[in-house]
Each structure stands twice: as structure tokens, then as C-alpha cells.
Image (cartoon, helix red, strand yellow):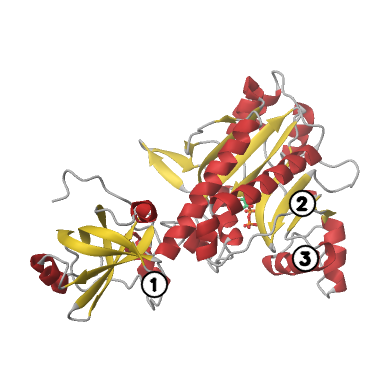
Amino acid sequence: MGLTMKRTLINELKQHLGQEVLVQGWVQEVRNLSKIKFVILRDRTGDMQTLALQTDTEPDSFALIDTLTKESVVEIIGIPKENKESRWEIEVLIKKLSIISMAEVPLPTDNTDKSQTQIDKRLDYRFLDVRNVKKNAIFKVRSKLVKIVTNFFDKNGFTNINTPKMTTIGVESGAELFEVNYFGKPVYLAQSPQVYKQMFVVGGFERVYEIAPVFRAEKSHTMRHLTEFTGVDFEMGFIQDEHDVMDFIEKMVKDLLKNVKKEAAAELGMLGVELSLPKKIPRLTMAAAKKLLAEKGKTFSEDADLDSESEKLLGELIKEKYNSEFVFITNYPWAVKPFYHMKSEKFPNTTKSFDLLYNGVEIASGSQREHRVEVWRAQAREKGLDPATMTKYEELFRYGCPPHGGAGFGLDRITHRLLKLDNIREAVLLPRDPERVSP
Ligand code: ATP
């Protein structure tokens, strides 16, 4: 059955009112009122109601509906009709129904909107979980974000690069590295593409980006940390200073929100998310941010980093003061940033660095990098690192290196904040954390 007919998707039915169509999908729900039976069907474009009537549906198909289990895959030949009273506005009158793949009972999880299944179990059966149209919508939005950001990099002269994820080069703290046995030798899962991004700015591409996994061996049990996440990293050459990088990010964020609002309107509507478009993103030095926090009774030493609680509070204060969901916090203390960030002349003991907060959570972190080899070496030593152990990194600055800077975003964090999800795990198909490495 159906072999000669072309499949019609649920969101195309409007164009086929009154004509016989073939629809295929999963059974979301069956309601049997004896003379009339309803089958809610779902495909990749959404869900809809189909109905079988004793008078119009083939008797075998009519009987078959009684045996249908939830989440089975079926195909239906029927006629789409308008029904203004139904929430779908269109319903398909079933002529013939056949089962392609029957789902076993009971299902291991409940993937309906009323589900009480805990997140752990849902993640164990993620392929069932994301059949729910709202859960599915999160990943449609995420997919759009990747597309929009990729277009934006492309339009701005960036080259997409792929850098190794098994490496012996690590620039952040060694404590965060996962060790891998590489034919008997220890290598590490990349905790950042930092060195490689700089390598190919220096390699003449000037502007590079990568969207790829990043691994962090941190035993964090928070709603915003994972041990594997998707980094959106970029690096750009020939900048004047870190403000060029922030200017670029500001344009990127505006472009991202404007386009996702347009291109994922249906999904955002389904998730009840209203996006407001950013105007000017305020830039506050860390010292100024600490002053604001002090007014609310939160005090920090000059060299301290912000904790997540103060980032949240800062998010609220910025919203109040500047009516902005975003803020750049600039000039982090030298004490809390890596050695390769350029130091600021204007604000002593600080670096030309910044973090971008979105509704009180850090979503990106960047800086101008130190490209003068002598200064680079001195800064490494100041942080207790021996440049002789990083010769492959050091060489980048020895054969013609333009001033440059860049930043790293977490795609999962952006999705998490943009959709106001309570847990970053909701924004990742198969999250990895200290307790979860499966499926
Ligand atoms: P945080 O202070 O939130 O732990 P970080 O300072 O370690 O983050 P960076 O190393 O600057 O973060 O990484 C750049 C971006 O990558 C962050 O702004 C965030 O969006 C994302 N990110 C970092 N660590 C994680 C993680 N463990 N899980 C998910 N995303 C992360």
C-alpha cells in the first residue's frame, strides 16, 4: 500500500484539502469512541488528528486501530478536511491504515506533555523523549542557531576549520584534561581549540572559526556545566584591541537573535519563548561590576573572579539599569585569566579580556591575545609555566604574527539561556557529565 503515492507531510496538508493523500508517522494517541476513532499522528513537521468512521474507513483498517499501540509507525491514506473546531484546524479522514512498525508496550518512558518521567530516565531514552514536539523544538532551534551563526561567520570572511580533538597541546589548567591512551602514550581530549585557532590566524586565514566538541574534566554538578560541550570558537587577526572582538560579537548576537526569531518562530511559539532583540550591549569593567555588586552587599577582593550567584545578580542589575539582557564584563584581573591574554595598559593588573553574560549566565569568554613573543614568554613564566615546554605554541609568535583576539561560546549555553531552560542538559541531545557517559 502507498507504494505509488508520494508522502505528504503534516504541514503540507493545507495544500491538499479534499484530495487523497498518504501520510506516515508515529501514533501519538488513540481514542476509541466505537463508531468514531481518533489517531493523533506525528511526523517531523508536527502532529495532527486523523479519524476513522465506520461508514468511510475500510473495515480492516477500522478494526486495526483497536490494536494500535502508542509510538507505532503507521501509514494512512485519507482525505484532509478543514475542521475549524479542532485545534489542528485540519483533520484527515482515514480510508486505509496500515502498521509499518508496531511499538512494544509498555513504553519505557512517557513522552507526552504531561509526563512525570524524571530527566535521567528521559535521557536514557532520548530517542523517545525528542519525539515530543516541544522537546524536538529545542533541537530545531539549536540547529537554526548553528546555521545562522555559520552564515554570519561566512559573510564576515571567516574560514571554518576542524582541529584535532586528541592532542598533547593544552593551554588551560591541566586539572581539566581527560587523558586518553594513544597506543600506550598519554594524550588529552582537547579542552579548547585555542592554540589551533591562533595557529591558523597566523597561517594566513586571518579569521577562523570552529564549531566542535570541547572536553572538560570538571566534576561540576551544576545546571550549566557539562564534561563535553559544543564550542563555537573564533579568532580574528589584525585587530586594534579587544573592543574589535566585542564589536564583532555584538553584531553576531544581534544577527543571531533577529534571524532565529524569524526562522524558528513556530518552535519559539511552541516553547512559549519571546525574544527581545538587543540594542547596544553595555560594556562594564570588572571593577565597575564589583562596585555595582557592592551596592547590593556583595563584596569581592580586587583579584577575585565572579561566582555564579553574583553573575546572576549582575544580570538583574544590568536589566534594571540598562534594560539589556546582555552585558560584557571587561578587564578581568590578571590573576584569574590565562597567561596568553594580553595585559591592559589602561587598567593595571587586568587583562584585555571579557566575558559575555546573557540573563546572568556567562555564554562566552574572549580577549586580545599576547602576540609579542618576549611578552608572551614573560607572562608564561609569571604564571609558573615554562615556555620551553610549549615550543609548538611559542613558534606561532616567531615567524610573523598579527595582533589578534577571539572568543569561545558554548552552543549548549546559548540554547539554554535563549530558551530559558532550567537545565543545560535539556539543550543537549546526549549530555555528558561526571555521572553520565551513556547512551
Ligand atoms: P564557567 O566560568 O561558566 O565555568 P569557563 O570560564 O570555564 O566557564 P571558558 O573556558 O571561557 O569557560 O569557555 C568558553 C565558553 O564555553 C563559556 O562561556 C561557556 O559558554 C562554555 N562552557 C565552558 N565550560 C563549560 C561547561 N563545562 N559546560 C558547558 N559549557 C561550558
Q: Secondary structure at mark 1?
A: loop
| Residue at image mark 2 | 335
Residue 72 in the figure: left or right of residue 242: left
In the rendered image, residue 88, in percent from the top left (x then y), is placed at 40, 67
Image depth: mark 1 or mark 2 in front: 1
Q: Which residue type carries mark 3?
A: Lys
| Residue at image mark 3 | 319
Q: Mark 1 or 2 closer to N-term?
A: 1
Which residue is pictured at 89% across the width and 40% down the height?
345
Q: Inspect this view and state whether residue 24 appears.
A: yes
Q: Which residue type carries mark 2?
A: Ala
The answer to whether 152 is drawn above or below residue 301 in the figure is above
Which residue is pictured at 81% across the width and 49% down the height?
331
Which residue is pictured at 81% across the width and 72% down the height?
298
In the rendered image, residue 439, in percent from the top left (x then y), is placed at 33, 57
Q: Residues within 10 Å of mark 3 (few under 14, many from 20)?
A: some
